[in-house]
Image (cartoon, rainbow, N blue to C red):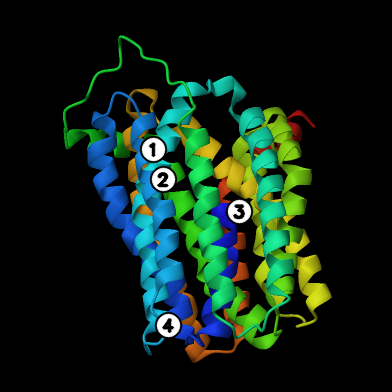
Amino acid sequence: MATGIVSTFVPLYLIDALHASHQQIALLNSLPALTGLIASLLGALWIPRLTLFRTFSVATIFATRLTYLLLALVPLATPYAAGLVVDANALANFPQTLGNLGWQALIAKLIPSSMRESFFGRRNVLITIVGLAGTIVTGALLQFFNPHAKLPYQAVFVGAFLLGAIEVWYLARHREPVRSTDRPRPLEWSTFGDLWRHVPYRRYVLLAAFFNFGWQMSWPLFSIFQISTAHATGLWVGAFTMATQAAEVLTFAWWGMKARLHGGMKMLGIAGLGVSLVPILTVLSPNLWYLTGVNFFSGIFLSGVTLLLFTELLHASPPSDRSTAIAFYNVVLGVVAFVAPEVGIVLLRWIHMEDAMLISTLWRAAGSLFFLAPLIGTIRSRIGQFSASA
């Protein structure tokens, strides 16, 4: 609930209440990526040296939720209020990234490989339902206030902090097993070289980075189109998120089941192709009901992408260096997440919104086809075998 409320309504707060510029909306996406990149670099050095991950995750995620109070306490009388909100949001991503790295290492330790798709599918359904409830309630409440008023948003961010405190309490209740093999690992730079020489891991990191660039390039463009062009209010922004999350709830388990039957990379490529259509579909019409439908369509495939990007990372990572592999992967994607939104805004300055969204669609589609490349090779091999036998 906490992260869903903040991520959904901070853009609306910036554009409607604080009148942020397009560049500040781009920084809303790229600055957290920069702080996340720095945190990922530190995490890559720090986390592999931990023997237990729960305490680290609890501390860093609680620090993240504390930064939600900064969003509420930004002095609004200053002309720099929008920039301060962007900075506070970026600051939140530093402990959030460290917390995610710790949580990923913890959950990889707790959940065996054979259960990952089903576990994450069910878990994602539950947390999406809860997050959906928070978004609906928040969007409905904001509808009663002037969209340019600032106080309602401040109250929302305080509420997000209180929900985050409950989240941290539940996280602290995890029981992490202590094994005799769990020992702090000394920092060895050769570990990163060994990881890169691991072909399945290297290939997956490069594919994920390429796909994420096209995926994240259009993230600030969605907020600009939906709020500035389609004039979506708080209720409609909540409806967009609700439509996406409702579709995710309905399809998480399906993607996990299909990944077990047909392979995670194949289903990741198919999910990516569906997600690739979203940018171009979005700019076809500013009709708010239509955009709600596009967000529902997006959620069908987004659930597969978010589920399988992580599970396939775990499968591609060497078990002996998994925590380091996760951290290094996040460093690479942190670079992508910092650069891609800025590229999207630069494109918007040079060309029309429709053309920028089309480029994102084509890039996403190309990345999805790369995920399917091993399948294409298998199909060609089978066709060749069939032709030879014929």
- For image coordinates 52% across by 64% down, the residue present is 157
What residue does disc 1 label? 57
The answer to whether residue 179 shows anywhere in this view is yes
- Looking at the picture, tell me which residue is in the foreground, 129 or 285: 129
Amino acid type, mark 1: Ser
What residue does disc 2 label? 61
Disc nearest the viewer among 4 and 1: 4
- Cβ–Cβ below 8 Å for labels 3 and 2? no
Q: What whole-number distance in Å separates the C-alpha atoms at marks 3 and 4?
A: 47 Å
Q: Split into 4 quadrants, where in the image is the C terminus?
A: top right
Residue 52: x and y in percent read 33, 25
**Is the residue marked by circle 3 packed among few (<14), some (14-19), or many (20+) residues within 10 Å?**
many
Numbered disc 2: secondary structure: helix
Residue 156: x and y in percent read 57, 65
What residue does disc 4 label? 76
Q: What whole-number distance in Å separates the C-alpha atoms at marks 1 and 2?
A: 6 Å
Amino acid type, mark 2: Ile
